[in-house]
């Protein structure tokens, strides 16, 4: 349970906002409501929040934002938590549901992703987003250069202090503490959520962590392995799209039927042992085949990081079925900058390139930056605090590789006393055919928050999630929200559909066309076709124990 955060307001001004807010919520005159909402919001700027324990906070702007285009009115609070964690907090002016939410960011963060609060705000949540303690493009790591504070903030502190600050300001505004607190994020946001469960198990009643980086330094190790093997010395791809399609079709031919239906999706890619050397050209076949060099590159991308002796040093690589997304991975510049700037005491040097990484030795140095490591499987404090954790990951994710997450979950099972004990508070959902956070050939559209709320607030554990694949034709023409960066002019319909999939609002509007649905069961249980009924309908599938590996 989330403890009621109490703090002493320092300074000479003591403002009681609640009577103003109460009038604003009940007064039927629109002009009066707007005026009093502005006054109640302005009043927060005069409150001294520097006394929040561990999270001294300064509000820099407080603005009443009126209802518009279906979005509710809210008080927009901007500020920072000393010394440098920037944030935006949105407080519903009316119809607060009594709950608090923090949303995560993506990439290397560096800006406040307040747009992620749009949907929670419509549901009545007070919602906060932070920049994770630095300014940046989301792709660069220069902010970490000789900046230990920024590294620690990104590593674990910023998420925690934003929760403390946001709940304290919300309590001041509404004159009562939030009754429930949630964290929701994917990618880096997923990393934040898993880190919170480990380091600050009392911050949130429920956490949704999608596609989490497990151990940021190890994630960069895996990313370095990919760029080293996928690109040549000039940074050009070694595998063409036609080659990737050839391999993808061969992987499907081997494993597509593992869920009982031929649908272009490998239902259990963790068990699919596809050997690309089967496709090597020979005397009888010179077309639609691989060179020995191409087959070797593909084997390495499946296997994941290894030493020069062939010893595995990580948790695997790309999974079979993900080949059409292999051209999407962390850019080489990003991993280079992490090893040049991101780790205090790691002497990569200013001229370091991804080709310089030594897979025999350099991974042994990651202990220099323990603040990036969220791989601790001991979640007993989170469990004892009553917390609930939903982690989800796509089987065709090529940004954060799925093996790290399944390995982490299995480690938690071993630490916590087995599957039943673990699944009483932590459930992993593996989504076949889903790319990074969303999109892909699988049924990726899931209303995770509703399942988490039911688990936390009503004790209804998520025994199965209903998922949907939204029509690709619809996504290719669906309106996109205003984004902070310009979209590329040469964007293909497939690229546009993938972007649109990330911005679907849950639960889905009934007017959104769905191509097919699937059930998703807690890992390691998989969904399997019952042998009868419409294969596009989730009702035609049931739970099954995972198959043995395809040999």
Image (cartoon, rainbow, N blue to C red):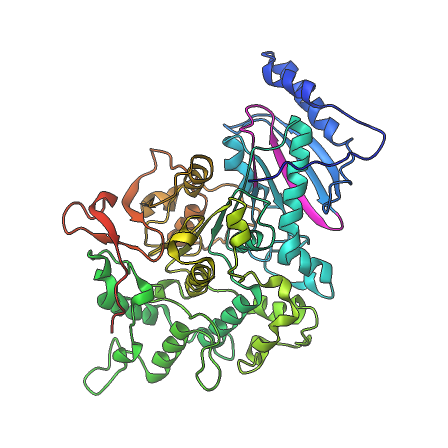
Q: Is residue 529 left or right of residue 246?
A: left
395 displayed left or right of 385: left
Q: Quadrant of residue 504?
A: top left
Residue 315 sits above or below residue 530 on the image: below
Residue 60 coordinates in the image, percent (x, y): 75, 38
**Up-down: is 525 above or below 467?**
below
Q: Is residue 399 magenta?
A: no
Q: Position of residue 452 (x, y in %)?
A: 44, 41
| Residue 522 visible in the current orientation | yes
Query: Residue 191 in the image: x percent, y percent?
Result: 54, 56
**For this rendering, which residue is in front, 97 or 93?**
97
Res 506 quadrant in image: top left
Residue 244 found in image quarter: bottom left
The magenta segment is 82-101
Residue 131 visible in the current orientation:
no
Farthest right residue in view: 12
């Amino acid at each position: 349970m989330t403890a009621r955060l109490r703090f002493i307001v320092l300074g000479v001004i003591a403002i009681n906002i609640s009577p103003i807010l109460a009038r604003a919520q009940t007064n039927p005159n629109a002009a009066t409501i707007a005026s009093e909402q502005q006054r109640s919001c302005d009043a927060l700027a005069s409150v001294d929040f520097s006394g929040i324990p561990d999270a001294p906070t300064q509000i820099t702007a407080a603005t009443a934002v009126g209802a518009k285009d279906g979005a509710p009115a809210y008080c927009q609070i901007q500020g920072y938590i000393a010394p440098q964690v920037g944030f935006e907090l949105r407080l519903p002016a009316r119809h607060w549901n009594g709950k608090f939410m923090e949303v995560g960011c993506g990439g290397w963060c560096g800006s406040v992703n307040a747009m992620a609060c749009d949907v929670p705000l419509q549901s009545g949540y007070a919602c906060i987003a932070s920049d994770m303690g630095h300014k940046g493009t989301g792709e660069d790591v220069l902010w970490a250069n000789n900046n230990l504070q920024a590294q620690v903030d990104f590593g674990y502190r910023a998420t925690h202090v934003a929760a403390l600050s946001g709940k304290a300001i919300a309590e001041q505004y509404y004159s009562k503490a939030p009754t429930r607190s949630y964290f929701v994020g994917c990618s880096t946001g997923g990393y934040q959520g898993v880190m919170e469960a480990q380091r600050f198990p009392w911050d949130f009643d429920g956490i949704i962590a999608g596609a989490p980086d497990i151990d940021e330094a190890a994630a960069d190790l895996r990313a370095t392995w990919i760029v080293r093997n996928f690109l040549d010395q000039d940074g050009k791809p070694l595998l063409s799209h036609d080659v990737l399609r050839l391999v993808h079709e061969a992987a499907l031919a081997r494993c597509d039927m593992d869920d009982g239906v031929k649908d272009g999706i490998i239902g259990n890619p963790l068990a699919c042992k596809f050997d690309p050397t089967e496709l090597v050209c020979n005397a009888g076949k010179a077309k639609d085949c691989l060179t020995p060099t191409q087959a070797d590159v593909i084997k390495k991308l499946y296997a994941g990081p290894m030493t020069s002796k062939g010893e595995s040093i990580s948790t695997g690589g790309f999974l079979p079925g993900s080949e059409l997304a292999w051209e999407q991975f962390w850019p080489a510049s990003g991993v280079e900058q992490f090893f040049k700037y991101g780790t205090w005491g790691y002497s990569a040097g200013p001229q370091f390139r991804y080709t310089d990484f030594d897979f025999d030795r350099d991974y042994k140095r990651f202990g220099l930056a323990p603040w990036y490591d969220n791989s601790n499987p001991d979640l007993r404090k989170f469990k004892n605090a009553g917390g609930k954790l939903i982690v989800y990951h796509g089987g065709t994710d090529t940004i954060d590789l799925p093996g790290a997450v399944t390995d982490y979950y299995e480690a938690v099972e071993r630490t916590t006393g087995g599957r039943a004990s673990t699944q009483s508070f932590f459930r992993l959902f593996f989504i076949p055919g889903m790319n990074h956070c969303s999109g892909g050939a699988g049924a990726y559209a899931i209303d995770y928050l509703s399942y988490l709320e039911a688990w936390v607030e009503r004790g209804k554990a998520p025994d199965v999630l209903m998922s949907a694949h939204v029509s690709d034709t619809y996504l290719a023409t669906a309106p996109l929200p205003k984004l902070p960066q310009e979209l590329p002019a040469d964007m293909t319909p497939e690229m546009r559909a993938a972007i649109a999939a990330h911005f679907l609002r849950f639960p889905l509007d009934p007017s959104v066309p769905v191509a097919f649905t699937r059930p998703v069961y807690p890992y390691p249980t998989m969904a399997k076709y019952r042998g009868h009924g419409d294969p596009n309908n989730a009702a035609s599938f049931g739970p099954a124990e995972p198959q043995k590996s395809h040999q």
